[in-house]
Image (cartoon, helix red, strand yellow):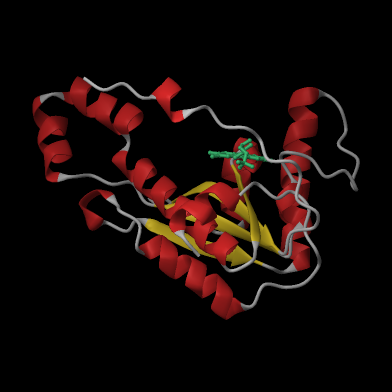
Amino acid sequence: MDVFDSMKGRQSIRRFRKDPVPHDKILRMVEAATWAPSAGNAQNARFLVVEDPALLARMKGIVDNLLSRITGKEVPPDKINYHNLFAAAPAAVCVVGKPYESATDRNLREKDPERHRMRRYQVNAGLQSVASAITQFLLAAYSLGYGTCWMTGPLVAKPELESALSIRPPEELLAVIALGVPDSPPPKPPRRPPEEITDFR
Ligand SMILES: Cc1cc2nc3c(=O)[nH]c(=O)nc-3n(C[C@H](O)[C@H](O)[C@H](O)COP(=O)(O)O)c2cc1C
C-alpha cells in the first residue's frame, strides 16, 4: 500500500470485532515501529501486548476507579468510554518508553541546569522518539487490515497501571494502543489544509 494511502486511510477505531490478532502480524507492526527515527537511534520504545481478558478487565477496573474518584460519578462496569475502550479490543498494546539523554544533555545538566530541565520537559527527545514509533506501528497495522486507537486517556491512572503491568523506572508507560479488526469505522475527522499550517521563509 502506498504510504500516502495508509496515512489518509488510517483512522482511530474504537469498536473492534472479537477476532484475535495473530502474533506474527503484531510482530510486523512492531518491526515497522523499529524503523522509526529515534533520537540517537536509542530505539527506546518497547511494546507490552496485553491479550489476557482478566488482565484487560483489571486494567479497565483501575482506569474506571480512578475516573470515578476524580469525577465523583461511578463508571458503570459495562460502559466503554474514551479512557477504557482498549479493554474491549482483543489486544491492548502498552507502549513503554525509556528516557533518552544525549551527551549534550549530560553536559547541560552540569553546566546549565535550567536549560537541561527545559530540554528534558519541553523538548523531550525520548518522548518524541516513542511517538514516531507509535505512528509507524499504527500505519503498519492499518496496511495489514487492522484498526488501532492511540490512547493516553487510560494514563489518568499511570502509576496504578504501571504497577499492575510491572513496569518499573527508568521505564514508564507512555500510551496504550487498542488493536483489533475494525467493527464499522466512524466517519473520518477532517484535516486542516496544508497551506493553513505551513509557512515558507
Ligand atoms: C497522543 C494521543 C492520545 C490520544 N488519546 C486518545 C484516547 O485516550 N482515547 C481515544 O478514544 N482517542 C485518543 N486519541 C485519538 C484522537 O482522538 C484521534 O487521533 C483524533 O481525534 C483524530 O482522529 P483520527 O485518528 O481518526 O484521524 C489520541 C491520539 C493521540 C495522538
Q: Position of residue 15 (x, y in %)?
A: 78, 53
Residue visible at 64% across and 78% down in the picture? 22
Task: Give the side of residue 193 with respect to residue 120, left or right.
Answer: right
Q: Is residue 168 visible?
A: no
- Looking at this view, is 149 or 115 the one in front? 149
Count of numbered circles on the image: 0
Residue visible at 72% across and 64% down in the picture? 181
Q: Position of residue 158 (x, y in %)?
A: 58, 42
Residue 105 vertical placement versus 185 (above, below)? above
Q: Is residue 11 visible?
A: yes
- Looking at this view, is 145 or 73 the one in front? 145
Residue 29 vertical placement versus 4 (above, below)? below
Q: Position of residue 50 (x, y in %)?
A: 64, 65
Q: If the picture is divided into quarters, which one holds ligand 1? A: top right
- Looking at this view, is 41 or 73 the one in front? 41
Residue visible at 78% across and 65% down in the picture? 54
Split into 4 quadrants, where in the image is the C terminus?
Answer: top left
Residue visible at 16% across and 32% down in the picture? 109
Task: Give the side of residue 36 with respect to residue 60, left or right.
Answer: left
Residue 93 vertical placement versus 106 (above, below)? below
In the rendered image, which quarter is residue 194 located in?
top left
Residue 86 vertical placement versus 91 (above, below)? above
In the rendered image, which quarter is residue 138 located in?
bottom right
